[in-house]
Structures are given as C-alpha cells and as structure tokens.
Amino acid sequence: MKIACFGGSFNPVHIGHIKLVEALHKDGFEKVVVIPAFHSPFKNAFTDTSDQDRLIMLELAFKNHPYVEIEKCEIQRGGISFTYDTMKFLEEKYKNLGVDFEKLYLVIGSDLISGFGKWKNASELANMVNIILAKRPLEEIDFESLQFPYPHQEINNDLYDISSSMVRKRIQNQESVVELLPEKVFEYIKDRRLYCE
C-alpha cells in the first residue's frame, strides 16, 4: 500500500489542501494520512481556534474522501511535535496493524525546502521515508533555484494561491472566503464565528 503523510496546522483547512490530497490519490496513493499539528516548533501556538475546531473542520472537509485518515497523534501527544517522531510513530502503527508498505511517503511543501536541514534528525528522516515535494505558489522565493540534497520526488499538483493565514486575515477584515473553503468548513466557521476579532 502506498501511504502519503501530510501534516500542517490546517487552521483552517482550505481548498488548496483538498486539491493536494486529491492529487496524491490520483497519483496512486491508496491512503492519505492528514496530520494536524498540536504546536509546530517553528510557529506560534494556535490561539484563535481549539484543536477540536480544527479536527472537526478536517472531518467535514474530507467526509467524502474515504481514502483520507485524520491522524490525531500530535494533538494527543501535546507539546512540540517533530516530524521525525511522528513518522516513527506512524511507521510502528501501520506495521503493528499489519499494513503492507515498504516506506511511508512524507509530503512537504516546496516552501519548506530551505529549512528542511534544520528539522530534527533530517538525514535520518530522509532515509526513513520517501519525500514528496508539493509545489506551492512561489511568492517572493524562486524555489526552483534552491538545492534539496535529499532523495525526493515531486508531485505535479495544481497551484492555488491560498493559505490559512490569508483565510484568517480575510475573515478578520470581513471579506468573503466562500471560494477558498469547502462548503461545510465555511458554514462551520460562520456558525462558530471563528477567526473573528
């Protein structure tokens, strides 16, 4: 079985996340594990929503994607989670469940290329998993000019100029976000008045 692991804050999950997961499935991945972070070591704590809100939005977003599994290990673990530890956990989990796989695949955005070497046990992580680089809008950085010295492959995903921070900012500015979010996620945010100051 080919298993892709895709982590992030998903604060909130948006159309760009959905389309990337769908691209992975079309590329032959039978399972896509979506891993919401409790608290990234490179970001501030998520003070504007609860972990439960983010989990509910992920469940709503992927309700009709039976190949998606929402993995709660980082939220349940609490504190700072490192990708290396999470991938070790998932490797053991699926082995214990008797799932037949050679290596897990780790999806990272091309915007993370320059900092990957600073990740915990980066070289060991790169040997443990198969790395997939997903394209992100280039913004101010020419990612194609950056060198990524670890074995990897790329996925030819469509680019959507969307970020969770953009969604939050537009909500705070009372601007429309309906086209940026899955319908059920939009309704949940609206009903719960999330991200409003």
Image: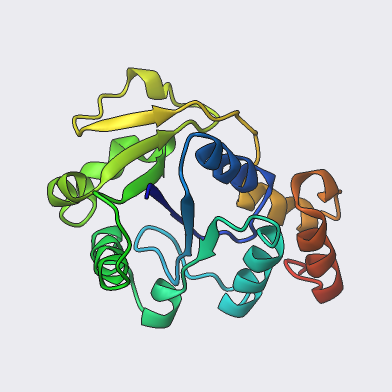
* Image height of 33 relative to 30, above or below: below
Locate residue 50, reporting x and y percent.
60, 78
Locate residue 32, reporting x and y percent.
48, 53
- Residue in the image at 64% along x and 33% along y: 160
Quarter the C terminus occupies? bottom right
Can residue 78 be spotted in the picture? Answer: no
- Residue in the image at 60% along x and 28% along y: 158
In front here: 122 or 129?
129
* Image height of 124 relative to 9, above or below: above
Can residue 64 be spotted in the picture? Answer: yes
Locate residue 8, reporting x and y percent.
48, 56
Q: Is residue 88 left or right of residue 145?
A: left
* Image height of 46 relative to 116, above or below: below
Q: Is residue 157 left or right of residue 77?
A: right
* Image height of 25 relative to 90, above or below: above
Q: Is residue 135 left or right of residue 151?
A: right
* Colouring used for the render: rainbow
